[in-house]
């Protein structure tokens, strides 16, 4: 909010006169406007050390306001050290401020550190190469990735449980919690992972984090030294790539095919890699399930080379033509797998709750690193989720959403085939809440995605998932959030985008 009071210099003992006016329409309270005006005048050198301010009575009269806000502003100037009060003499600008004793600070010369437009001394290390997310990744709407069926989430039950935990006077809910997370939540997660995902773990191996992204970032910080080679799936999940890159990893793209990560190519490219990031249950974004042969080969390579496997088990709960595929971690006999899971898909992403199931000997290092990052996860939400599981809501919600997403998947497949015929090939629709369509012809998938976004369709260009040159053109389409009835219309709009793009390219 702009403060409109202005300070003007006048000769004489009482040099300071607020010449202009106070903005009575502003939402900034009067005492704050007056304080900010004086503070700025002092910091900018328009008021000097030893200058005397009007008495509060005079200033209130000059401004035509009550004395209360003026006294409040003066108190704040005194409390923050811009002014001092001398008994019987009044309020004066202090002499110790670097600019208060002389003229306004001179502008920085070009080339001086901090001069406008000049270089700023921030890290030029790995984080300097990270880019902000493009709009198609963050915008909600038809086909947006990461959206879930909010309209089918049992918010009433959830709200009741959260409210109950928020009213809980047990101080464990409001104090800092342990860095590992809330024990009943970790027990519930460990139990769920053992039963549903075939993960071999106890609660003492579970560290709660704010979603898989923090889990992967934490794993990168703990496991990787700058310059280490790390295999990443090609195409793959940019979020994991970013976390690895931020830790200074040298990213080694390893292709995926129908059996998932091509382990032999990984070994040929960088046998000495410190770690690999994989999505074995449902490869992101092409959807392959990693074959048993590849899983065992990957574990064998990790065992022999001492590498770490970061298994991102995102979306594994939703599988349409078979039971969920068990986790790679359950096959590991050498404690080389760092397992990553999230509630973003099965509850909702803004909850920011995820978890790691760790090799026992890594727990202490992960814990220390996690505490350095953000101390602990939010206890009340973990407690509410534990209640959500205990009351049977979670199992019920999973059952219902499995059916719902299965219907959406069928509707998507049907609408795409009807609208596009054989111009598109659907891939990766056996699990999760997105599929990938591959097509020929249109080279610039980012431009295509931008044009789709102009029509309210938030698709992800496949090239964004590649480090190198993509061999296929494609778009990744989420269907978790879109109501079933809107799918055919959205797909028809997508056809129009394709047609107009192809028409423009030919014309
Ligand atoms: C491959 C993959 N892993 C993990 C996630 C979820 O991240 P988070 O748990 O941080 O919300 C996503 C989100 O889209 C994803 O695509």
Image (cartoon, rainbow, N blue to C red):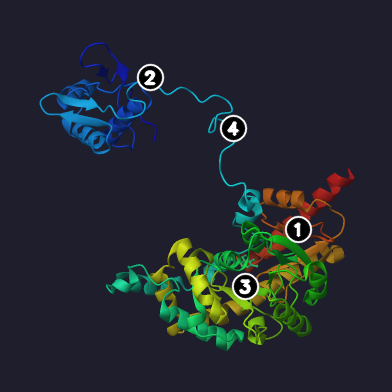
Return the residue nearer the eye: 68 or 359: 359
Q: Nearer the viewer, residue 271 or 451?
A: 271
Picture quadrant of ligand 1:
bottom right
Q: Which residue is mark 1?
A: 467
Depth check, mark 4 against mark 3: the one in front is 4
**Residue 345 pos. (x, y %):** 57, 71
Residue behind mark 4: 118
Q: Earlier in the sequence, mark 4 or mark 1?
A: 4
Q: Position of residue 507 (x, y in %)?
A: 88, 43
Residue bearing the label numbered 2: 103
Please tell me which residue is depicted at 24% across the width and 22% down the height of the picture.
50
Nearer the observer, 429 or 67? 67
Distance Cα–Cα, label 4 vs label 2: 24 Å
Locate the N terminus and report the quarter of the image it occupies: top left
- Kindly tell me whether mark 3's CB lies below 8 Å from ligand 1: yes
Q: In the figure, 414 relative to 101: above or below?
A: below
The answer to which of marks 2 and 3 sits earlier in the sequence is 2
The mark that comes first in sequence, 4 or 2, is 2
Q: Residue furthest right?
A: 506
Dots 1, 2 in contact, CB < 8 A? no
Residue 314: numbered disc: 3
């Amino acid at each position: 909010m702009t403060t409109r009071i202005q300070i003007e210099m006048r000769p004489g003992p009482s040099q300071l006169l607020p010449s202009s006016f106070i903005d009575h329409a502003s939402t900034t309270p009067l005492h704050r406007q007056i304080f900010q005006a004086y503070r700025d005048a002092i910091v900018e050198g328009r008021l000097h050390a030893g200058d005397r301010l009007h008495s509060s009575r005079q200033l209130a009269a000059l401004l035509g306001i009550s004395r209360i806000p003026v006294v409040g502003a003066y108190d704040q100037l005194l409390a923050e050290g811009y002014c001092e009060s001398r008994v019987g003499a009044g309020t004066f600008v202090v002499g110790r401020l670097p600019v208060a004793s002389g003229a306004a600070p001179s502008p920085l010369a070009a080339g001086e550190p901090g001069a406008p437009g000049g270089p700023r001394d921030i890290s030029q290390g790995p984080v300097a190469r990270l880019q902000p997310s493009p709009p198609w990744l963050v915008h909600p709407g038809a086909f947006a990735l990461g959206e879930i069926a909010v309209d089918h989430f049992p918010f009433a039950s959830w709200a009741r449980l959260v409210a109950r935990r928020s009213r809980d006077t047990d101080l464990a809910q409001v104090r800092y919690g342990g860095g590992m997370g809330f024990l009943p939540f970790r027990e519930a997660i460990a139990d769920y992972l053992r039963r549903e995902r075939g993960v071999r773990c106890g609660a003492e191996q579970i560290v709660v984090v704010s979603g898989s992204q923090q889990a992967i970032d934490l794993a990168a910080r703990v496991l990787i030294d700058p310059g280490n080679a790390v295999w990443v799936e090609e195409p793959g999940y940019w979020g994991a790539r970013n976390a690895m890159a931020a830790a200074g990893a040298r990213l080694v793209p390893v292709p995926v095919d129908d059996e998932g990560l091509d382990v032999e190519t990984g070994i040929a490219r960088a046998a000495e890699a410190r770690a690999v990031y994989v999505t074995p249950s449902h490869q992101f974004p092409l959807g392959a399930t990693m074959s048993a042969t590849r899983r065992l080969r990957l574990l064998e390579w990790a065992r022999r080379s001492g590498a770490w496997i970061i298994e991102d088990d995102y979306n594994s709960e939703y599988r349409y033509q078979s039971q969920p595929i068990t986790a790679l971690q359950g096959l590991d006999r050498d404690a080389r797998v760092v397992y990553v899971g999230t509630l973003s898909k099965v509850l909702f992403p803004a909850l920011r709750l995820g978890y790691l199931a760790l090799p026992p000997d890594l727990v202490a290092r992960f814990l220390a690193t996690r505490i350095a990052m953000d101390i602990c996860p939010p206890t009340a939400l973990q407690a509410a989720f534990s209640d959500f599981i205990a009351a049977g809501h979670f199992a019920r919600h999973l059952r219902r959403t499995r059916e719902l997403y299965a219907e959406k998947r069928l509707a998507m497949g049907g609408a795409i085939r009807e609208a596009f015929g054989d111009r598109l090939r659907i891939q990766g629709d056996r699990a999760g809440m997105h599929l990938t369509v591959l097509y020929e012809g249109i080279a610039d998938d980012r431009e295509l995605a931008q044009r789709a976004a102009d029509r309210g369709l938030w698709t992800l260009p496949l090239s964004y998932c590649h480090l190198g040159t993509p061999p296929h053109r494609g778009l990744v389409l989420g269907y978790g959030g879109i109501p079933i009835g809107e799918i055919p219309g959205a797909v028809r709009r997508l056809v129009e985008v394709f047609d107009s793009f192809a028409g423009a390219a030919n014309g």
